[in-house]
Image: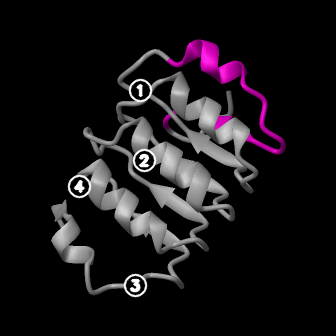
């Protein structure tokens, strides 16, 4: 497996056909992940559970760049209501959002409505 994703790793790789990206429990930076997302407009599923340094910046990149995203797993990440607002404001295909044990307060943001969104806590149980 891969323990670290950095911008140098991504310079020669153009993942336009990338549909699923599972980076859970890896070390990656917001900059590296956002650089990847710019070239992955068809991404449908992103799992960054346990990526302790993933913040609002990545979620905002997903909302703005990945219109076909339907599954976003953010458990154990560092994000705020800003992320949830970005997801609600952009026209994505998001249906599943996993936020269990997020390392910041998002309770008021959970009220943000998004069509067809199923909010899941860690372990996959619907909230």
Q: Are marks 3 and 4 in contact (CB under 8 Å)?
A: no
Q: Position of residue 114 (x, y in %)?
A: 78, 37
| Upstream in sequence: badge 2 or badge 3 | 3
Secondary structure beneath dot 3 equals loop
User: Is residue 32 shown left or right of residue 114?
Assistant: left
- Circle nearer the N terminus (4, 2): 4
Q: CA distance from mark 4 to mark 2?
A: 15 Å
Quarter of the picture holding the C terminus: top right
In contact (CB < 8 Å): disc 2 and disc 3: no
Question: Label for residue 14?
Answer: 3
Rounded to the nearest angstrom, the CA distance separating label 3 from label 4 is 20 Å
Residue 101 marker? 1
Foreground residue among 127 and 28: 28
Q: Mark on residue 26?
A: 4
Camera-side mark, 1 or 2 = 2
Q: Secondary structure at mark 2?
A: helix
Instruction: Give the spatial CA distance, label 1 vs label 2.
Output: 18 Å
Q: Quadrant of residue 6?
A: bottom left
Q: Can residue 101 be seen in the rendering of this structure?
A: yes
In the image, the segment drawn in magenta is: 106-122
In contact (CB < 8 Å): disc 3 and disc 1: no
Identity of the residue drawn at 51% across and 82% down? 16
Q: Which residue is mark 2?
A: 58
Q: Is residue 93 above or below residue 7?
A: above
**Secondary structure type for disc 1:** loop
| Earlier residue among tags 1 and 2 | 2
Q: CA distance from mark 4 to mark 1?
A: 17 Å
User: Which of pointers 4 and 1 lies earlier in the amino acid sequence?
Assistant: 4
Horizontal side, residue 42 vs residue 25: left or right: right
Of the numbered discs 3 and 4, the one sitting upstream in the chain is 3
């Amino acid at each position: 497996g891969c323990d670290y994703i950095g911008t140098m790793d991504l310079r020669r790789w153009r993942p336009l056909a990338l549909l699923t990206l599972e980076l859970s429990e890896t070390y990656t930076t917001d900059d590296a992940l956002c650089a990847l997302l710019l070239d992955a407009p068809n991404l449908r599923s992103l799992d960054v559970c346990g990526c302790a340094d993933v913040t609002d910046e990545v979620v905002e990149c997903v909302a703005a760049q990945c219109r076909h995203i339907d599954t976003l797993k953010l458990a154990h990440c560092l994000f705020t209501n800003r992320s949830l607002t970005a997801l609600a404001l952009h026209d994505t295909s998001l249906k599943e959002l996993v936020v269990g044990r997020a390392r910041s307060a998002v309770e008021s943001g959970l009220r943000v409505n998004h069509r067809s969104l199923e909010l899941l806590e860690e372990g996959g149980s619907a909230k």
